[in-house]
Image (cartoon, grey):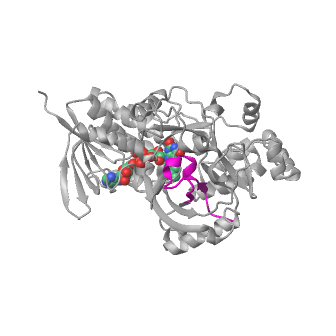
């Protein structure tokens, strides 16, 4: 029998776990060994337990335009075919198509959820993406709306030279709409003014979106783009469950996982990686040898931990930018953002999965409501967790507040925007910090091609996933890159194709 080769997989996020799952289920001669620095799996898409109630690190809807990925997810978690508990209690009607699993009986179920996410601004809800309709005009007021209209017309006639994201957006939406809905929010997310962000960011993320197109979409009855984003899938017990289900099979079939184990050195000889030096939670250091290395760890840490890397490559890697993130979660007695839609909800809270908070007087980026993703995330169906998402940098004020300071800060912000009526509405508070949650596209990113070529030159190294490729990948892209890496290793085919994941997708939901 052919000797089993070892595939060392750095990271137990959805990319690494998918790759291990595909290898273990399709290739007898390849043994995946996953090395994960955290004591838990799921990476950025993990689910956290807060005294019996659960929430993901941030809102995670499963949505993709890629058939292969959706079929893969459904093969791991069967699709919902009967009502979930909230649908039953509220007598809501859901169309289940080809689903057959009953979430009231089965645990391994991919729920089908209706999507609501809106913008909250001036203490009012706006459609997302912003639509020019009566509701928007009433919310903004006639004068503001007319200013938006005139400045939009001006932007159609007088085009700015497009050097930055600011120019890109003003050319497409006009200055007033840009100031109202884009400028401050972009700054909150990235910590940079849009005028300091390269226009390529807009080209990648809001390619093809224009006000005229948005208006036309509104009148088009048969618009697949819009209807696709009206629903999403979601594991019964949270995003992490997708990884947990795969891990069961990985372990059953002989794969390995080492949790609480950090890769600290990548040992290269000529053009091949021979071993990884790892450190466990007790501080014990050892080497793990393998034939292939699949990495979903941040490119910056990968290259800075590798021996004999050319100085120009290190300089670029060291200056790759990231955005950190923290989730401040409250168990609340009462949530004041009430339901003003036809879609019924438990406790009559707004039905949104998450809400973009636009007001300049607060630093909250979004409000995320886990129970709107799955009622099975609640200990009791009446329990409501409200999570405030703060985008930050590791050395900034928000990041360095003590727990008590940030809890108080979040409550004050919720009061400012009327999300709660009084601080007594908060029963419990929790905090979760995430480093490198967002790979960013500025600073040395413009030279990322040098890094790609260098990685391509290392024969047995395969970079996958979000930080592994330093790309704004969603779970579907990370899943796809894991599938592709396993295929490439299995067939000894060209690995440079990995970089094509998420190279030309457009996403409707991004402003
Ligand atoms: C707030 C937020 C909301 C999001 N919402 C959505 C959404 O709605 N839909 C969607 O599709 N996507 C969403 N995403 C994106 C999604 O989370 C990611 O695309 C996906 O989870 C990335 O998976 P990954 O496996 O590529 O990377 P990761 O999840 O980052 O996994 C990499 C793993 O490598 C480990 N690691 C790193 N360094 C080392 C080391 N030195 N040694 C060992 N292990 C190491 C990490 O601990 C981590 O577990 C969101 C992301 C965020 C932050």
At 40% from the left and 50% from the top, the residue drawn is 43
Relative placement, left or right, of 100 versus 203 is left
For residue 292, above or below residue 415: above
Relative placement, left or right, of 492 versus 124 is left
Relative placement, left or right, of 215 versus 409 is right
At 18% from the left and 56% from the top, the residue drawn is 286
At 45% from the left and 38% from the top, the residue drawn is 109
Residue 115 coordinates in the image, percent (x, y): 61, 41
**Of 47 and 139, which appears nearest the observer?**
47
Report the magenta residues as a range.
361-390
At 77% from the left and 30% from the top, the residue drawn is 219
**Of 132 and 295, which appears nearest the observer?**
132
Magenta span contains residue 381: yes
In the displayed image of the protein, which residue is found farthest to the left?
A: 1
Which of the 4 quarters of the picture holds residue 458?
top left
Residue 184 coordinates in the image, percent (x, y): 67, 57
Placement of the N terminus among the 4 image quadrants:
top left
Q: Please indicate, yes or no, whether residue 349 appears anywhere in the rendered image.
A: no
Residue 158 coordinates in the image, percent (x, y): 79, 42
For residue 37, above or below residue 28: below
């Amino acid at each position: 029998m052919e000797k089993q080769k070892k595939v060392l997989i750095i990271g137990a996020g959805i990319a690494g776990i998918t790759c291990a799952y595909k290898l273990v289920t399709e290739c007898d001669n390849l043994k995946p060994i996953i090395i994960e620095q955290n004591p838990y799996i799921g990476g950025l898409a993990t689910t956290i337990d807060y005294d019996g109630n659960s929430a993901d690190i941030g809102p995670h809807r499963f949505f993709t335009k890629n058939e292969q990925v959706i079929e893969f997810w459904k093969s791991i978690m069967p699709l919902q075919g009967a009502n979930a508990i909230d649908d039953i209690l509220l007598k809501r009607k859901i169309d289940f198509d080809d689903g057959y699993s009953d979430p009231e009986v089965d645990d391994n179920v991919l729920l089908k959820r209706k999507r609501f996410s809106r913008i909250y601004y001036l203490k009012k809800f706006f459609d997302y993406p912003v639509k020019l309709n009566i509701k928007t005009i009433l919310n903004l007021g006639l004068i503001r709306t007319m200013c938006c209209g005139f400045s939009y017309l001006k932007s159609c006639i007088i085009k700015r030279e497009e050097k930055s994201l600011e120019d890109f957006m003003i050319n497409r939406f006009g200055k007033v709409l840009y100031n109202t809905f884009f400028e401050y929010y972009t700054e909150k997310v990235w910590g940079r003014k849009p005028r300091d962000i390269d226009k390529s960011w807009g080209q990648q993320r809001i390619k093809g979106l224009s006000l005229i197109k948005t208006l036309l979409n509104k009148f088009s009855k048969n618009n697949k783009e819009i209807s696709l984003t009206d629903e999403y899938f979601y594991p019964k017990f949270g995003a992490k469950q997708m990884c947990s289900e795969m891990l069961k099979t990985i372990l059953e079939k002989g794969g390995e996982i080492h949790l609480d184990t950090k890769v600290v050195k990548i040992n290269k000889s000529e053009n091949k990686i021979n071993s990884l030096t790892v450190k466990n939670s007790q501080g014990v250091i050892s080497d793990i040898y393998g034939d292939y290395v699949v990495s979903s760890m941040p490119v910056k840490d990968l290259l800075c931990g590798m021996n004999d890397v050319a100085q120009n490559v290190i300089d670029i890697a060291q200056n790759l930018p990231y955005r950190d993130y923290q989730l401040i979660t409250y168990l609340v007695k009462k949530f004041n953002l009430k339901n003003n839609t036809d879609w019924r909800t438990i406790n009559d809270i707004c039905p949104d999965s998450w809400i973009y908070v636009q007001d300049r007087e607060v630093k909250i980026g979004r409000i995320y409501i886990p129970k709107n993703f799955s009622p099975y995330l609640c200990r009791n169906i009446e329990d409501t967790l409200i999570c405030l998402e703060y985008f930050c940098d590791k050395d900034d004020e928000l990041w360095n507040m003590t727990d008590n300071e940030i809890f108080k800060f979040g409550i004050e912000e919720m009061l400012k925007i009327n999300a709660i009526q009084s601080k007594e509405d908060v029963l419990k508070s929790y905090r979760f910090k995430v480093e490198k949650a967002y790979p960013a596209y500025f600073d040395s990113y413009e030279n990322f091609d040098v890094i790609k070529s260098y990685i391509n030159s290392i024969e047995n190294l395969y970079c996958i996933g979000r930080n592994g490729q330093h790309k704004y990948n969603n779970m579907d892209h990370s899943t796809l890159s894991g599938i592709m890496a396993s295929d490439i290793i299995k067939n000894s085919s060209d690995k440079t194709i990995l970089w094509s994941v998420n190279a030309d997708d457009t996403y409707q939901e991004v402003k």
